[in-house]
Amino acid sequence: MLLKEEALIPLNDLGLLRSYSIFDFFRVLSGVPVFLEDHLDRLLGSVDKMELDLRWSKDEIRTMCREIIASNEVVDAGLRIVVTGGYSHDGYTPARANIYMMMHNLPEYSPDDFTQGRKMISSNFTRDLPEAKTTLYVHAIHHQKRMKEVNAIEILYHTDGVITEGSRANMFFVDQNDVIVTPADAILRGITRRHLMHVAKDKYNIVERTMVMDEIADMKEAFLTSSTKGVLPVIEIGGVVIGDGKVGAITSDLHQLFNAHVAEYITAHREEFDDS
C-alpha cells in the first residue's frame, strides 16, 4: 500500500489509455464496509462481462479491503476498487488485469436534499455494456455544466424515450395507485436498489418493467438510489415537475426504511470488522 501522493499508474495501463476497466464503490460506516459481499459479487460480475483476466480471488480481494480499511483507520469513508485491462503492449490488446484500491471522503448531502428533493436533467444515451460498472463516464462528465445550470443532481438516461437509469444511480417512480415502478432492462443493477426492494417488498407493490419518458408527467413521486445517496427524492426531471413538486410520503418512508436497514447491517457486522 502507498500514500496517495506516491501512487503511480504506468502509461500503458489499458484503463488509462482506453478506459477499459471496471470498478465498484461502497461506503464504510463506523468501520464497517456496507454490503461488502454484494459489492464484491457485482465487481466480479463486471469482470466477467468485460472478460478481464483477473488473478485475484474474491477471498483475496476481501482481504485487501480489510487491510486498506485497517491501514487508514477508517471510520466513515468510501472505498473504490478499480480493475483495469492491464499493461497493454500495443495500447489496445488486454493483458493481465491490474487492481487498484483507494479510500475517498464521502460526498456530503444537505438535509434539504431529502426533505425538499432535487432536480434531474435527461439525456438520450445508452451506456456501453450497461450491466457492467465500467469507468467510462464521458457522457455524464460532459454534462456537468448543463446540470449545474439548473442545479440538477443527476442525469436520467433514456434510449429513444425508453427510461433506463441515472448516470450514477437507479431510478424509481411511484404511480397514481401507489405502485413503485422501476426500469427492468439495460441497467446496472445497483446494490442499494436491490436492498431497498428487499426491505420494501412486504409493505409496497414493486414492479420492474419497461418505462417511457411520457409516463413521467403522470407519476406522483420519484426518487433515485445509489450507494452514496441512499434513497434521494426527485421533484423534477427535464423540466417536468413530479406530482405536486414536493417529496412524497412513500419516498420519505422508503428513505427511513433503507436507513434503518443500513443501521441494522452495521450493527450485525461491527464485531466482525472490529477484529480486523
Image (spheres, helix red, strand yellow):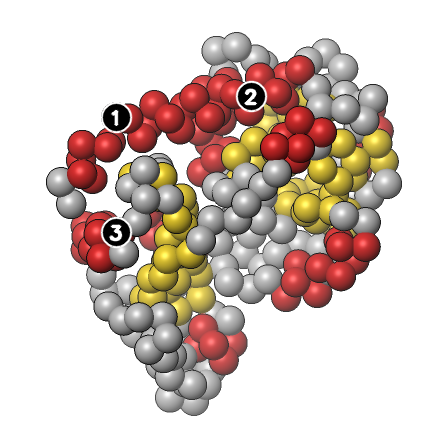
Task: Please indicate, yes or no, whether residue 111 appears anywhere in the rendered image.
Answer: yes
Earlier in the chain: of badge 1 and badge 3, it is 3
Which residue is identified by label 2? Answer: 254
| Sequence order check, earlier mark of 2 and 1 | 2
* Quadrant of the frame with the C terminus: top left
Q: Which mark is residue 268?
A: 1
Q: Earlier in the sequence, mark 2 or mark 3?
A: 3
Q: Which mark is residue 157?
A: none
Q: Is residue 119 above or below residue 20?
A: above
Using residue 179 as the reference point, say whether residue 236 is left or right of it: right
Q: Would you say 263 lies left or right of 235 here? A: left
User: Residue drawn 37% across and 84% down?
Assistant: 10
Residue 267, x across and y down, in percent? 28, 26
The location of residue 196, given as percent across then percent down, is 49, 26
Return the residue at label 3: 73
State how far apart marks 1 and 3 are (Cα). Answer: 20 Å
Residue at 41% x, 85% y: name it. Answer: 12
